[in-house]
Image: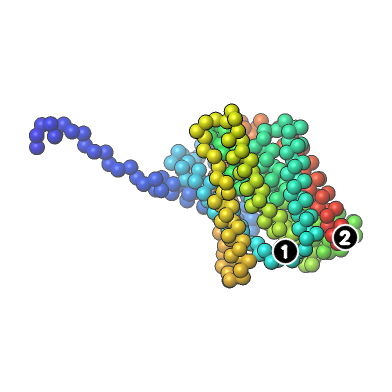
Amino acid sequence: MSPRSALRPVPALPAPPQRRRLLPGLGLGLGAGAIAVAAGAAVPAASPALVAIVLGTVLANTGVLGPSVRPGLDATATSVLRAGIVLLGLQLALGDVLALGPAVLGVMAAVVALGIGAGLLLGRLLRLPPMLTILISCGFSICGAAAVAATAGTLAAQGSERERLRAHTATAVALVVVVGTAMIPLLPLAAGALGLAPQTAGTWAGASILEVAQVVAAGSLLGPEALDAAVLVKLGRVLLLAPVIAALTLALRSRSAAPGAAEGGARPPLVPVFVIGFLLAVLVRSSGLVPPAVLGAAQLVQSVLLAAAMFALGTGVRWALLRQVGGRPVALALALGVIVTGTGLLGAVLTA
């Protein structure tokens, strides 16, 4: 060996594959998601989404989590989240939703459109951050925590804005859970006081209550006939998640292309891939070829994936950001709760 060759630097060992860096955080997120879903099954009043976000926030603010889990948690908050949204489509059969009739379909569209429109207007009047306004508006108008998560996955954020987006997401999910849980006993009581027929009460519940699980709980209190109507109407609202996310993406593309927008920024795709996957899952379910056992397993996996994503989002929340929230988001949430519930009641009565 020549002296020159002996002085050459020894090549560095190859860095571990990028995917290997994701494993600790992915494992932690999926484990936390499974724990949150198990807690929700053991205690029906405990929302897996809220349990997961609280658990992630507590761990992040007590210094338990090390930097090695961060890459995997970031992937959980994005890729795993989108996989959960795709599997959510397997709960929807187009034939069942279309069988509700054009009048009920119009009610669902009105609830979503008026809820989001009123939320954006009220959020501006309350001087809330635009990201938080959009998240709360979509969560209250469409399908609760899943809509919040899907919307958060569409909004582009970097650096400190990414941390703020996580805090806004946690706030929106918490408001969805609190207000939606309060509606479980209140709406059946109101339906009884108004003397609504079971079908009408079920339509009202499905058009107004925020989470699918909350709709099932309230529908069970209203009776079997009302429960069937409530679940179908609610799943119809879930189906509207796809066009709303597509419209939001178009708005973001327009803004990024507007004069004065930052150059070199990546424009979001015209239709997000996970939205296409969601629609394909709806078509697969609508074909009737998927066995019930597979659908049940997919629903469990979907619940764990979404809870894991909520945990990952919670790990990005800092107490300092949450303390800046104040009472204005609560005011927006309560106002939207009244608007969505009132619109749902009017539509249910008119279509009875």
| Number of marks drawn | 2
Judged from the image, the secondary structure of the residue bearing numbered disc 2 is: loop
Residue 244 relative to residue 269: left or right: right
Residue at 57% x, 54% y: name it: 276
Placement of 112 over or under 291, stated as above or below: above
Mark 2 touching mark 1, by CB under 8 A? no
Q: Residues within 10 Å of mark 2 (few under 14, many from 20)?
A: some
How many angstroms separate mark 2 from mark 1 (CA)?
Answer: 23 Å
x then y, percent, for residue 85: 59, 53
Mark 1 residue element: helix
Which residue, given by chain and number where applicable, does mark 1 sit on?
98
Q: Position of residue 327 (x, y in %)?
A: 74, 34
Residue 196's label in the rendered image is: 2
Where does residue 24 sit, x and y in percent of width and height?
44, 47
| Three-letter code for the amino acid on which mark 1 is drawn | Leu
Q: Amino acid at mark 2?
A: Leu
